[in-house]
Amino acid sequence: MSEFNEFDQQGSVPERNTGSIISHAFEMYKGVFLYGLIIIIIYFIANFVIQNISGYNLLNNLRSFRDLDGDYSDYSYWNRSGTSLYYSGYSFLGILISPLYVGLIYITNKFNTKEQIEFSDLLIGYRQNLGNILLYSLITTIILWISFLMCFLPFFFVYPLFFLGYPILLFENANAMDALNKTYNIVKENYSTFLGTALLGGIISLSGIILCGVGIIFTACFMEIAMYSAYCAYLGKPLQIKKQ
């Protein structure tokens, strides 16, 4: 288990607006993106395994969708072979990997406060508060999938409500329900800022697709860094986690 101590005056904190939060996150990401790259490589390998087990091929399905030439009347995406199994496995994978995102936030905090980073820091989410991290990820995954299936658009408006959850679980050692309540209450009072931050963070995270798709492995984890920056802006400098 870890002890929490207030850390010193090192480390920057953004202002409470979208531009400052994104700028702060970008400065942080330049120092820790290699750890984000490791997470995405792990994710892609695991996703490849899930596709092979389910018999679902994401690229082939995207190509077949493109080849419809705008006539989608007879296209039944969810009834295609392996689709349900693949997306069930995909969701489960996202839940299992969520502690790595918490670890990336922890590493970002150490980078911000000029502390020495160790590779094992990436795994802190599996050593501390694991049950609540997985439960929080499960609950938010279910809610976000429901919002996604409601014509997709609601997803963009629901996602920001969970923006501070992972940092709260890490720095405050909160349980899943407390993290959900706290992030919801903070975000709803400052919704426009968090909506703008989530949208810009999402655009940056997906911007790597422009580089023939492969570039996304370098940008995909930017959102987690934006979560850390938003936490700093609205809840102050987090508590330093001192491992025993």
Image: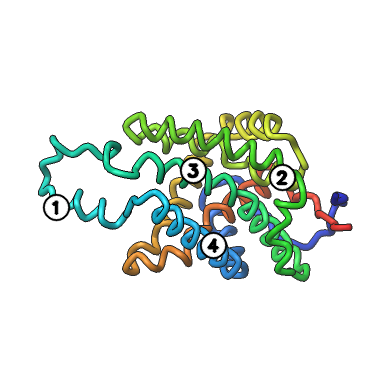
- For disc 3, the marked residue is 91
Rounded to the nearest whole Å, what is the CA distance between mark 2 and mark 4?
A: 19 Å
Q: Residue at x 14, y 36 (%)?
A: 74
Task: State yes or no: discs 2 and 4 in contact (Cβ < 8 Å).
Answer: no
Q: Residues within 10 Å of mark 3 (few under 14, many from 20)?
A: some
The first of marks 1 and 3 along the sequence is: 1
Marking on residue 42: 4
> What separation in Å lies between label 2 and label 1 (alpha carbons)?
44 Å
The residue under the point 68% across, 29% down is 177
| Secondary element at image label 2 | helix
Residue 90 locus on image (x, y percent): 46, 47
Q: Which residue is mark 1?
A: 67
Identify the image quadrant of residue 244: bottom right
Instruction: Name above or below for residue 129 compared with residue 36.
Output: above
What residue lies at 54% left-to-right and 66% top-to-bottom? 37
Which sits earlier in the primary sequence, circle 2 or circle 1?
Answer: 1
Relative placement, left or right, of 17 versus 215 is right
Labelled disc at residue 236: none
* Viewer-closest of 29 and 197: 29
At label 2, which amino acid type do we have?
Answer: Leu
| 88 sits left or right of 170 in the view | left
Badge 2 or badge 3: first in the primary sequence: 3
- State the separation of the CA atoms marked 1 and 3: 27 Å
Mark 4 residue type: Ile
Per the rendering, the mark at residue 130 is: 2
What is the C-alpha distance between the residues marked 2 and 3? Answer: 17 Å
